[in-house]
Image (cartoon, rainbow, N blue to C red):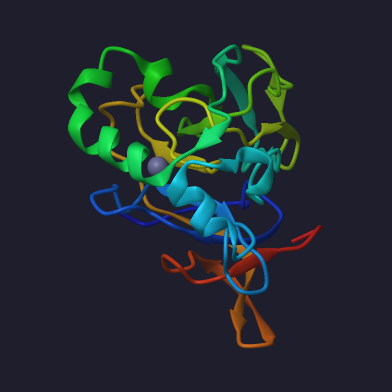
Amino acid sequence: MKPIVIRCPVKGRWSFLNPPGHHPDAKDFVAVDENAKPYKGIALLKHLLGRLKVSEVFSWEAPVFAPFDGSIIKVENACEDRQRLSLISDVYSGLFLGKQEYAEHENEFFGNHIIMQSNHGIYALFAHLKKGSVQVKQGDKIKTGNPLASIGNSGNSIQPHLHFHLMQENEPLTSEPLPFVFSACELQNDTLWTKVKNTLPKNRRVFRVVDGA
Ligand SMILES: [Zn+2]
């Protein structure tokens, strides 16, 4: 299937840090610094030891924007954000709880989330949003680039990030994610940035989106 062209739903410098086993057409957006890190260097030790705070992660509270014109189908805005991050215990519980247990509980899996439908009928899921940050409500008509919410750490999330995917049906747990590309973004090559169109950066490649792209 031909990838769907969308506006990137975040601005600034990002990388896709999909964990092993993650669906390749769904992406985990993580904000990164000039060293491609999601938080300052020393924080990795704090993360392992369970002492990292969400506010130390660059993705925390980053705004999320509409990737196309459409309407809001569903909003969940009341799930707690997990404030303390512990890589070891989170990975352990993530491995042993398994996905099936979450299957009946969309909020446990996605936390605060938005489902938006494009004017062409495609659905988009934005997951792990910050509690209380959702600025839209069911039925709202939305234009490309309108702010929707901020990134949080709700649901099944080991650190603040945006889980985003497109789908044919409004069934985020079962509908197969659809491939997409960004209408425009820039890819990092050492200190240079290369503008590209209708491209999706590879996982772990640093890319950025500046206003007006
Ligand atoms: Zn994800």
Furthest toward the right, the residue is: 211
Which quarter of the rendering shows the N terminus? Answer: bottom left
| Residue 53: image location, x then y, percent | 62, 40
Q: 100 or 74: nearer the eye?
A: 100
Q: Residue at x 29, y 47 (%)?
A: 23
Q: Quadrant of ligand 1?
A: top left
| Residue 141: image location, x then y, percent | 70, 22
| Residue 33: image location, x then y, percent | 66, 66
Q: 4 or 88: nearer the eye?
A: 88
Q: 136 or 22: nearer the eye?
A: 22
| Residue 61: image location, x then y, percent | 70, 38
Which quarter of the rendering shows the C terminus? Answer: bottom right
Against 174, is 15 above or below? below
Q: Residue at x 66, y 41 (%)?
A: 60
Q: Residue at x 64, y 20 (%)?
A: 131
Against 43, is 188 above or below? below
